[in-house]
Image: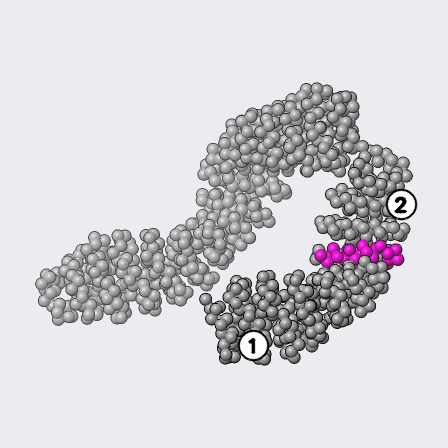
């Protein structure tokens, strides 16, 4: 609600208040919603009044506010209606450049309104605006020239603008270093040039406008090109544009990324090309190549202008061959099929002009121009018909071309003949199309000419010859990717499937080859099966003709890549003939059959059915043939089948190990990959492992860890992981440890995972632990602790844990930087990683040198946090680590400083006696400091420690009694131990058969007896008899 009082203050008798108010309004006016509200609340009248004051500061703020408000369309009308024009125009004349700039800017905004354009000129703004075009202040000039551009857009103003002498100054501004000034000046000249072409040219504007075509500003280029386009309609100006060197920059602009600039410049080129004198210069300066490029533009206007320019230039005899040499025929021929009649006409006219040259005629035919020209002979536009027949007439001078014209132009009537009832004619037409369809280009054209639908219909003809010709043609058409879906859409599948059962093997072959081609398309795979193709295709697998068997098995191979089809092929009885084909002597049939089996074997149920169908023996036999493709696919099929637990054993029992291990040495990496993947799967079965090792697989598997192929490395590492449990020494003996360590640095996370898993298994063996360290394993293992792959991280921390159990590794692991990442892992959200990490840290903390280093590296906060873990094992290991660290006297105060005591005291009440023992051990160590003795008691440590004295576990009781002995050194604690009922329990322990327990209890009571208050209590609690006994 600030606007009404602010507007009132614009009329304040105090100029300082007026100034603050108008500045506020000025600021508020920068908001689009406020623009409307300020005017609605009556802000315009006082703002207009302020422009009439003698105070330039008030004038400036008021005119800036008006300028801001004037960007709103309705405000443009209201500001003028409020009488603001006169004071704004007056401000153009004041000798204050800021006022001039803002006044001109306000007029520039207001002048976007059609009615305001005329009103501004009528109210006398032209004179001062033109004067401001000479201002030394570029901001003033910019606003003035933008206003002049807007005013010049009104036809009613143009004569007056020129009469007032604006044109020379506008022309001179084309030299301005400021893009916006150049752009606006060029825009004004564009507007004025229609009725003042000679004047613009007389002022030297053409040369300046040409120069602006090279401006880095696309907007400036656009305005300059638009002005030149208007000027180029004048014949004299066409000559001047060429004389001033305009052709080259215009040519460059034909490749402008700005479509508007491109369109305008090709329009200028078109106008220039109408002048015969320009034809050769334009060719010599390289205009023709970019014009040809523009024939491919998606902008119809650009295409139209470009083709007209090319037509004009083609009139020149020298240009005719050059235009064709530069590649104009393909896009020109394409334009004959344009939906725009004018473009068709101009393209046809250009081809006619080019065809005047005899050398161009065969090239037009070679480029495929005849079909489009023949089509145009039927055009409803007589001019286009005329131009087309003219071109064809020129081309027809060659005998060869006469034949070509008939052949190429005869395609539509040939297709039309397919509708005839005369089967002899239909047969020949279909046979001709069959022959033509060998050409890839024609495969598309026949479909484009609506031949496909008719050919599909003929597949069901009772005339066997007709059906054969149609099937042969569709077979060829199906070889083109673009036709796959179209043949199906036109209903081709049902009749083609019907022909699979035809008695004539030639017709069978055409049908099955067509389906083979169609089955490559993903969408078609489902549709072919859905239409019932599987039973006849499976029948053809037993055809007496190998060529038909091959096409049928390839089709089934293609179809088997679809998950739904995997099931259907088996259900329809496809497995037995596929197994039979693997037993033939024809390697092509064997290969396609085993690939189909391989594809089918990715289905879980099929894994069982394939083995049950007796496929294992022929697949294993194919591992032995000296054909790497067959080896690869056979191994791949076994790899798939071996994911089934029962199949793993069956494959080994059926003799696959020998040939699979042999394939591990194949020079073909694809063969090796499939073989090693199969070995990995087979080795997952405990029953197979001994046989795999006995067959000698381990050395080769180990050597494959050096393979440059990630998948081979990964599968080999996986196999070694599986085998390493019972064969640790064998793996190590084959040098596997060093190779597995190297794989920890693999860029493949899957390979890292398999290598780490194998090393984890191996690292349970003490000898292997030493080898892993000796082979430099610590550093890559350390690096893997920070792996983003959680599985790799978990496995590597497990290996580190195992290594840390060997005392000899403690210092090397610290020196190679294992401890910091281990500490980081204590914060992992993965409980397994936490557990392994804290055990490793506990093991490493046994080393005296490591104790301080671990604490220095910040282990205490996460260790203390783990004391509160919900996982008992993690609690136990964390507590054990803190106990181990507390053995070092320097660490004890740091454990307390980090807040470890409360959690340790809490663990004294834990149900797990091992955790109780570790906690009391740590607290006992910490209690050696006088300060800590008091802290332990004050934090509530006495009750749970005393409570432990009741335990039947003498090891825990011993540590609790020892801790109390340590705490009782403090005089303050001597009283509290008794107050907490510790004395009675300690006295009872004096008679313990466990000498260590009795000693700790006696030591504690000795300290307690040093306090006077305890003398009588010790006696009352019956302490004398056991003490005397001791």
Residue 816 seen anywhere in this rendered image of the structure = yes
Above or below, comparing residue 670 to residue 549 in the picture: below
N-term-proximal mark, 2 vs 1: 1
Left-right relation of 174 to 1030: right
What is the x, y in percent for residue 1024? 10, 63
- Report which residue position mark 2 lands on: 356
What is the x, y in percent for residue 86? 63, 72
**Closer to us: 473 or 1008:** 473
Q: Residue at x 35, y 54 (%)?
A: 874
Which numbered disc covers residue 512?
none
Circles 2 and 1 in contact, beta carbons < 8 Å: no
Q: Residue at x 41, y 65 (%)?
A: 857
**Closer to us: 869 or 537:** 537
Left-right relation of 597 to 830: right
Left-right relation of 275 to 910: right
**Closer to us: 167 or 583:** 167
Residue 368 located within the stretch drawn in magenta: no
The answer to which quarter of the image holds residue 837 is: bottom left
What is the x, y in percent for residue 341? 77, 44
Residues drawn in magenta: 260-281
Q: Residue at x 64, y 62 (%)?
A: 113
What secondary structure is found at the residue carrying circle 1? Answer: helix
Secondary structure mostly seen in magenta is: helix
Q: Residue at x 85, y 52 (%)?
A: 313
| Cα distance in 3D space between marks 2 and 1 | 76 Å
Q: Quadrant of the C terminus?
A: bottom left
Judged by depth in the image, the label closer to the viewer, 2 or 1, is 1
Residue 599 seen anywhere in this rendered image of the structure = no
Render colour scheme: one colour
Which numbered disc covers residue 58?
1
Residue 271 located within the stretch drawn in magenta: yes
């Amino acid at each position: 609600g600030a606007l009404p009082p602010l507007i009132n203050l614009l009329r304040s008798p105090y100029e300082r208040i007026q100034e603050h108010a108008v500045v506020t309004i000025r600021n508020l006016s920068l908001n689009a919603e406020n623009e409307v509200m300020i005017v609605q609340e009556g802000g315009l009248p006082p703002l207009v009044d302020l422009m009439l004051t003698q105070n330039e500061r008030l004038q400036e703020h008021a005119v800036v506010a008006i300028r801001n408000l004037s960007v709103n369309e309705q405000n443009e009308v209201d500001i003028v209606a409020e009488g603001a024009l006169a004071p704004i125009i007056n401000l153009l004349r004041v000798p204050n450049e800021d006022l001039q700039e803002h006044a001109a800017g306000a007029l520039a905004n207001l002048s976007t309104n059609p009615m305001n354009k005329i009103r501004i000129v009528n109210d006398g703004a032209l004179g001062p605006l033109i004067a401001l075009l000479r201002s030394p202040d570029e901001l003033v000039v910019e606003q003035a020239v933008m206003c002049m551009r807007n005013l010049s857009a009104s036809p009613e103003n143009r004569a007056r603008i020129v009469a007032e002498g604006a044109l020379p100054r506008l022309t001179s501004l084309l030299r301005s270093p400021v893009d916006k000034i150049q752009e606006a000046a060029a825009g004004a000249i564009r507007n004025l040039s229609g009725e003042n072409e000679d004047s613009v040219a007389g002022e030297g504007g053409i040369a300046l406008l040409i120069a602006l075509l090279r401006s880095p500003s696309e907007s400036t280029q656009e305005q300059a090109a638009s002005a030149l386009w208007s000027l180029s309609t004048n014949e004299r100006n066409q000559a001047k544009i060429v004389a001033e060197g305009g052709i080259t920059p215009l040519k460059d602009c034909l490749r402008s990324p700005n479509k508007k600039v491109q369109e305008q410049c090709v329009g200028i080129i078109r106008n220039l090309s109408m002048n015969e004198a320009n034809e050769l210069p334009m060719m010599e300066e390289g205009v023709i190549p970019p014009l040809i490029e523009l024939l491919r533009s998606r902008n119809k206007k650009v295409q139209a202008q470009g083709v007209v320019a090319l037509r004009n230039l083609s009139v020149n005899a020298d240009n005719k061959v050059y235009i064709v040499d530069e590649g104009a025929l393909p896009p020109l021929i394409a334009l004959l099929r344009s939906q725009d009649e004018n473009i068709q006409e101009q393209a046809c006219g250009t081809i006619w002009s080019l065809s005047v040259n005899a050398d161009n005629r065969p090239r037009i035919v070679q480029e495929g121009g005849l079909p489009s020209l023949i089509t145009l002979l039927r055009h409803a536009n007589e001019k286009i018909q005329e131009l087309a027949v003219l071109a064809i007439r020129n081309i027809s001078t060659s005998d060869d071309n006469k034949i070509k014209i008939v052949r190429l132009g005869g395609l539509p009537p040939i297709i039309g003949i397919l509708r005839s009832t005369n089967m002899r004619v239909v047969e020949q037409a279909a046979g001709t199309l069959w022959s033509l369809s060998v050409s890839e280009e024609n495969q598309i054209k026949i479909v484009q000419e609506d031949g496909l639908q008719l050919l599909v219909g003929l597949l069901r003809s009772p005339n066997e010859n007709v059906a054969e010709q149609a099937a042969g043609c569709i077979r060829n058409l199906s070889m083109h990717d673009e036709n796959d879906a179209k043949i199906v859409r036109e209903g081709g599948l049902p009749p083609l499937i019907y022909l699979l059962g035809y008695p004539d093997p030639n017709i069978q072959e055409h049908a099955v080859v067509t389906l083979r081609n169609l089955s490559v398309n993903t969408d078609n795979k489902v549709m072919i099966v859905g239409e019932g193709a599987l039973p006849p295709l499976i029948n053809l697998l037993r055809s007496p003709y190998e060529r038909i068997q091959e096409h049928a098995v390839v089709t089934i191979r293609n179809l088997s890549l679809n998950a739904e089809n995997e099931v259907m092929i088996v259900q329809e009885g496809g497995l037995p003939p596929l197994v039979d084909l693997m037993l033939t002597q024809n390697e092509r049939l064997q290969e396609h059959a085993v690939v189909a089996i391989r594809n089918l074997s990715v289905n879980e149920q099929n894994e069982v059915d394939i083995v049950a169908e007796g496929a294992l023996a022929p697949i294993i036999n194919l591992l032995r043939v000296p054909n790497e493709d067959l080896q690869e696919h056979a191994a791949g099929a076994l790899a798939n089948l071996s994911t089934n637990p029962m199949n793993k054993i069956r494959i080994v029992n059926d003799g696959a190990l020998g040939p699979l291990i042999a394939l591990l040495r194949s020079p073909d990496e694809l063969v090796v990959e499939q073989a090693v993947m199969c070995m990995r799967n087979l080795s997952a079965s405990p029953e197979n492992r001994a046989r795999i090792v006995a067959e000698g697989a381990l050395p080769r598997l180990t050597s494959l860890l050096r393979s440059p192929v990630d998948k081979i490395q990964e599968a080999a590492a996986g196999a070694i992981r599986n085998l390493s449990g019972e064969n640790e020494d064998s793996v190590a003996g084959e040098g596997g440890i060093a190779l597995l360590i190297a794989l920890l640095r693999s860029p493949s996370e899957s390979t890292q995972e398999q290598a780490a898993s194998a090393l984890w298994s191996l690292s349970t063996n003490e000898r292997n632990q030493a080898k892993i360290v000796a082979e430099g394993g610590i550093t890559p293992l350390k690096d893997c602790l920070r792996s983003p792959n959680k599985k790799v991280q978990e496995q590597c921390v497990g290996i580190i844990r195992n290594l840390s159990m060997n005392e000899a590794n403690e210092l090397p692991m610290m020196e190679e930087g294992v401890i910091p990442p281990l500490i980081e892992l204590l914060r992992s959200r993965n409980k397994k990683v936490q557990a392994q990490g804290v055990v490793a840290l506990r093991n490493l903390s046994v080393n005296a040198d490591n104790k301080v280093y671990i604490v220095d590296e910040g282990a205490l906060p996460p260790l203390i946090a783990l004391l509160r873990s919900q996982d008992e094992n993690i609690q136990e290991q964390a507590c054990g680590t803190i106990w181990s660290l507390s053995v070092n006297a320097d660490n004890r105060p740091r454990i307390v400083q980090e807040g470890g005591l409360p959690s340790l005291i809490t663990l004294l009440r834990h149900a797990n006696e091992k955790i109780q023992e570790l906690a009391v051990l740590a607290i006992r160590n910490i209690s050696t400091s006088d300060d800590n003795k008091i802290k332990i008691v004050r934090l509530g440590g006495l009750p749970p420690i005393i409570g432990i004295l009741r335990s039947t576990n003498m090891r825990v009781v011993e540590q609790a009694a020892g801790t109390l002995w340590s705490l009782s050194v403090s005089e303050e604690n001597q009283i509290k131990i008794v107050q907490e009922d510790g004395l009675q329990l300690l006295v009872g322990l004096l008679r313990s058969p466990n000498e260590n327990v009795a000693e700790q209890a006696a030591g504690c009571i000795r300290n307690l007896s040093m306090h006077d208050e305890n003398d009588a209590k010790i006696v009352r609690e019956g302490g004398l008899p056991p003490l005397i006994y001791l």
